Image: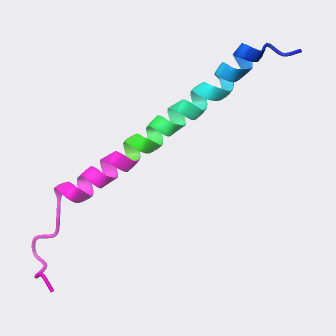
Amino acid sequence: MINFPLFVEGLLFPLLGLGLFVIYKRSKRKKRKFHAPPTHQLPS
């Protein structure tokens, strides 16, 4: 039988890292969009 805690760690850490990466990317993109609004367009 496989070592269960080792299996859980091996499965959990990559998923956790991927989740953090996705959240970081999403927040970065949202922040950039909010930080630089198009000022040259006239309000319709």
Tell me if residue 41 is in the magenta stretch.
yes
Question: In the image, is residue 4 above or below residue 38?
Answer: above
Residue at 18 percent of width and 55 percent of height:
35
| Highlighted magenta segment, given as a residue range | 26-44
Residue 39 location, quadrant: bottom left
Residue at 84 percent of width and 16 percent of height:
2
Q: Is residue 42 left or right of residue 13?
A: left
Q: Which residue lies furthest to the bottom in this view?
A: 44
The quarter of the rendered structure image containing the N terminus is top right
Where residue 15 appears, as percent x and y from the top left, is 59, 34
Q: In this view, does 26 lie to the left or right of 5?
A: left
Residue at 65 percent of width and 20 percent of height:
9
The quarter of the rendered structure image containing the C terminus is bottom left
Where residue 40 appears, as percent x and y from the top left, is 10, 75
In front of the other: 41 or 44:
44
Tell me if residue 21 is in the magenta stretch.
no
Question: In the image, is residue 30 above or below residue 14?
Answer: below
In front of the other: 10 or 4:
4
Where residue 41 appears, as percent x and y from the top left, is 13, 79
Q: In this view, does 13 lie to the left or right of 39?
A: right
Where residue 19 appears, as percent x and y from the top left, is 50, 38
Question: In the image, is residue 16 above or below residue 27?
Answer: above
Q: Is residue 10 left or right of residue 20?
A: right
